Image (spheres, rainbow, N blue to C red):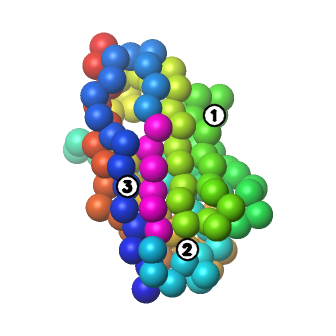
Amino acid sequence: QVQLGESGGGLVQAGGSLRLSCAASGSIFSINVMGWYRQALGKQREYVASITNGGFTKYADFVKGRFTISRDGPQNTMWLQMNSLKPDDTAVYYCAADRNGRWLPGDYWGQGTAVTVSS
């Protein structure tokens, strides 16, 4: 089993930045892809970005050029650097991990961290 815990959410003004963290514990050797999703109030959860053990990354079009996903060497911590934030980025952000190599990771989930961007 893998446990994921997010942190770093909060309130920020439009144009500002936040850095989200996701710490993984447990059977982390089984993880080969980690990623971020978000869910705004009243909307479905949507994919944001993901990163493989080898450091390859993918992003949703709406965050390209603004968000950067990264992982540390031992691969038990992941970050999402969010710049040029917009009110539309307001959502609960979830960390996810996958043991099956899927670019849309979904085997394990964190509890989420809330991000609010004020205009």
Residue found at x 28% / y 28%: 11
Asked whether the beta carbons under mark 2 and mark 1 sit within 8 Å of each other, the answer is no
> Residue at image x 76%, y 63%?
54
Q: CA distance from mark 2 to mark 3?
A: 16 Å
Where residue 39 appears, as percent x and y from the top left, is 33, 48
**Relative horizontal placement of residue 57, taking residue 44 as reference (left or right):** right
Which of disc 1 and disc 2 is earlier in sequence?
1
Dividing the image into 4 quarters, which one contains the C terminus? top left
Residue sitting at x 75%, y 56%: 56
Residue 86: x and y, percent? 41, 22
Q: Nearer the viewer, mark 2 or mark 3?
A: 3
Amino acid type at image mark 3: Glu
Q: Which residue is mark 2?
A: 98
Q: Is residue 1 above or below residue 14?
A: below
Q: Which mark is residue 64?
A: 1
Of residues 86 and 32, the one nearer the viewer is 32
The relative height of residue 6 versus residue 105 in the rendered view (above or below) is above
Please report the bounds of the magenta region as a residue range: 19-24
Tag 1: residue type? Answer: Lys
Q: Is residue 23 magenta?
A: yes
Residue at (31% x, 55% y) in the render: 112
Gap between marks 2 and 1, in whole Å? Answer: 22 Å
Q: What residue is disc 3 on?
A: 6
- Distance from disc 1 to disc 3, alpha carbons, whole Å, reads 21 Å
Q: Is residue 108 magenta?
A: no
Q: In the picture provided, is 116 more to the left or to the right than 63?
A: left
Q: Which quadrant does the N terminus fall into?
A: bottom left
Q: Would residue 108 be seen by someone viewing this image from the given angle?
A: no
Kindly indicate whether the residue at mark 3 contacts the one at mark 2 (C-beta within 8 angstroms): no
Kindly report the secondary structure that dominates the magenta region of the rendered protein.
strand
Residue 95 showing in the rendered view = yes
Question: Label 2 is placed on what type of residue?
Answer: Asp
